[in-house]
Amino acid sequence: MESVLKTLRSDQTPLYLAPQAGVSESPFRRLCRRFGADVVVSEFVSAAGILHGNERTLEYLRFDEAERPIGVQIFGADPSQMADAAAFVHETFAPDFIDINFGCPVKKVVKRNGGSGCLRDLDLVHRITRAVAEATPLPTTTKIRSGFDQATRDPVRIGLTCQEAGSEAICLHPRTRTDMYSGHARWEEIRALKKAVEIPVIGNGDIRSGEDARRMRDETGCDGIMIARGSHGDPWLFAQARAALDGKPIPPDPGVEERFRICLEHARNAIAFERDARRAVLEFRKHLGWYTKGLPSGRDLRQELFQVETLEEMEVKLDEYLGRYLEGDLPGAENHRGVEQLTGSAL
C-alpha cells in the first residue's frame, strides 16, 4: 500500500474501481485495470463469513497478481471480529491494503449494524478502525457515507474519527444511507473533508463520464477518484477519465462490434474464473444488460440474453444482433451507426 499512498500524493490523480457486490469480481477488476484503473478493491466481504470459513465468502478474496495494487474490503460491527478477519486476510491472501466498509446502504448489511449502519455510532467506527489498523501491518483505509441519515450527516466528523483511529486514506460517497442512490452526490462535502483531514481523500459518487472525473478533481481537490456504478458495462470509462484528467482528448465510446468483443472477453474470463460454468453465465447476465444499454432494439436483445445458459448461446445471440445491426435491419440502427461514424471508435 505504500506505493498506493505515494500514488495518492503524486501529481497524477489515481482512479479506483469501487468495491461492488456481484460486480467487482476478479475478471471485471482485471478488465478495468486494462482500461486504466490504477487501484482496485474487492467485493465487500463479511468478517463473520471469513472467520467461519464460509467457502463462498473466501472465494471473494481470490485475486490475480496482475490486479495489484488491490485492497480487500471487509465489513462487520464487532471490532474483535473485524481485527481477526483483517489478520486472516493479510496472512492468507496478502493484499496491498485492508479497506473497511462504513458505506454500504443495503438493508441486510445495515440491519446487522454493518456498512453505513455503523455511522449511527462514531465510537464504534473508531473502535473498529483502530482494531483493524492494529491487527495487521497492512495500511487500513475506510470508505464512508456522509452519515446514516440527515440528522447524523457530518462527513468531516466521521472522517476525523477514522483518521484519529488509524485510517491512512478515506473514501467519501457524499450521500447518507437513507439517500441510498437518489438525488445528487454533494461533492462540496468531499472538498470540506479534504480541507479537514491530513490523510488522502478519495472522492466517489456520480462519475459517469470522463468529464465528471475532471470536474470532481477540480471542484473538490480530492487525491483520488473512485468509480462505481458508472463502470457497469462501461469499463472504458477509466480510459476516458484518465484522458480528461490528463487534459487529453477524451476517446469516444466503442462501437457496437468492439463493445461486444469486450463483453465476450469479460464473459470468457468470468467463466474461466468461476468453477461452475453455468453459474458464471447466469451471474454474468446482469453484465449483458449493462453492455447492451442504449442499443437499438436493446430491450428485445436483453430479453433474449437473459435466457442464455452457456457462452455459446451468448455468442450466437450477440453475433445475430450484430449482423442485423450492420445491415441496418433494426429500428434506429442507421442513426446509431451514423453517430458511431461521426465519433469514431478509438478504444
Image (tube, rainbow, N blue to C red):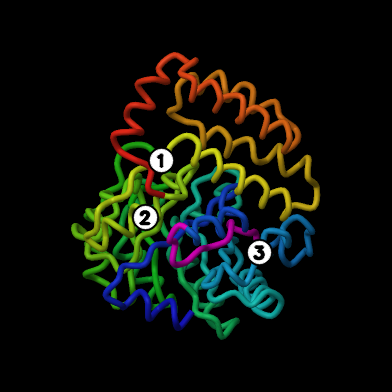
> Range of the magenta residues?
35-47
Q: Magenta segment: does it hold 46?
A: yes
Say whether disc 3 or disc 2 marks the residue closer to the N-terminus.
Answer: 3
200 left or right of 55? left
Residue farthest toward the bottom in the current orientation of the protein? 137
| Amino acid type of the residue tagged 1 in the rendering | Tyr
Secondary structure, mark 3, is: helix
Secondary structure, mark 1, is: loop
| Amino acid type of the residue tagged 3 in the rendering | Ala
Residue 174 in the image, given as x and y percentages of width and height? 33, 52
Identify the image quadrant of residue 26.
bottom right
| Amino acid type of the residue tagged 2 in the rendering | Asn
- Residue 52 vs residue 228, the one in the foreground: 228
Secondary structure, mark 2, is: strand
Q: Which residue is mark 2?
A: 204
Q: Which is closer to the viewer, label 3 or label 1?
A: 1
Q: Which residue is mark 3?
A: 47
Residue 181 — which label?
Answer: 1
- Residue 161's place in the image compared with 155, above or below, is below
Q: Residue at x 32, y 49 (%)?
A: 251
Residue 118 in the image, given as x and y percentages of width and height? 49, 58
Residue farthest toward the left in the current orientation of the protein? 219
Residue 38 in the image, given as x and y percentages of width and height? 44, 66
Q: Could you give the CA–CA distance between mark 3 and mark 2, rounded to whole angstroms?
A: 24 Å
Look at the image and tell me whether residue 330 can be seen.
yes
41 left or right of 7? right
Please rate how many residues cluster around mark 2, counting C-alpha atoms within 10 Å: few if below 14, some from 14 to 19, many from 20: many
Q: Could you give the CA–CA distance between mark 3 and mark 1, rounded to whole angstroms?
A: 25 Å
